[in-house]
Each structure stands twice: as structure tokens, then as C-alpha cells.
């Protein structure tokens, strides 16, 4: 099983974004993504996602050879 090493980039979509959330998002991300060689990333505040109960959605791009 592979880890998150193949991830080249990801986008995090968040509803009801508050700048105080950034520290929590970074803390969770650091549990899975290497701080030594992090992938490109973006944080996007959105009005809504596919389900009103969902507050965070992550889109990742991985390169597997």
C-alpha cells in the first residue's frame, strides 16, 4: 500500500471558512504529508459543497510511475 508520497498537489475546499481554521487544517495535513518535500497546495473558500453536511473536500493529484 502506498502512502501520500505520490501526491504532487492538492486543493482543499472549505465552507464557512474562518482564518482560525488554518492552524487546524495544517495540523491535520502534517499528519499525512511530509514537511520535508510538501506537494503544491491551495486552500479555497467556497459557498457550498455537494452535501450541506460536508465542510471540507480535498482534491488530490498523484503521480504514479
Image (cartoon, rainbow, N blue to C red):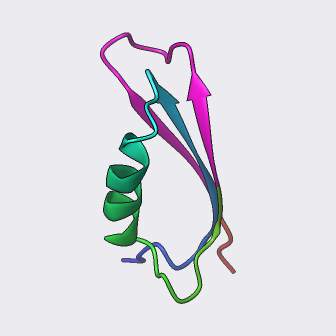
Q: Nearer the viewer, residue 22 or 41?
A: 22
- The magenta segment is 42-60
Asked whether 29 falls inside the magenta stretch, the response is no
Q: Is residue 47 magenta?
A: yes
**Which residue is found at the position 58% from the left and 29% from the top?**
45
Check the image and name the residue furthest to the front.
20
Q: Quadrant of the N terminus?
A: bottom left
Residue 40, position in %: x, y? Answer: 68, 65
User: For this view, does 65 lie left or right of residue 46?
Assistant: right
Residue at 41% x, 76% y is 3
Q: Position of residue 6 (x, y in %)?
A: 58, 75
Q: In which quarter of the view is residue 23 placed?
A: bottom left
Q: Residue 11 placed where, x, y %?
A: 61, 47
Task: Find the residue positioned furthest to the bottom.
Answer: 36
Q: Is residue 11 above or below residue 18?
A: below
Please name whichever residue, 56 or 50, is drawn nearer the observer in this view of the structure: 56
Percent across and percent down for residue 39 are: 63, 71
Amino acid at each position: 500500500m502506498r502512502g501520500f508520497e505520490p501526491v504532487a498537489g492538492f486543493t482543499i475546499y472549505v465552507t464557512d471558512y474562518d482564518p482560525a481554521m488554518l492552524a487546524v487544517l495544517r495540523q491535520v495535513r502534517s499528519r499525512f504529508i511530509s514537511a520535508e518535500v510538501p506537494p503544491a497546495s491551495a486552500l479555497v473558500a467556497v459557498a457550498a459543497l455537494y452535501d450541506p453536511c460536508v465542510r471540507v473536500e480535498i482534491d488530490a493529484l498523484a503521480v504514479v510511475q
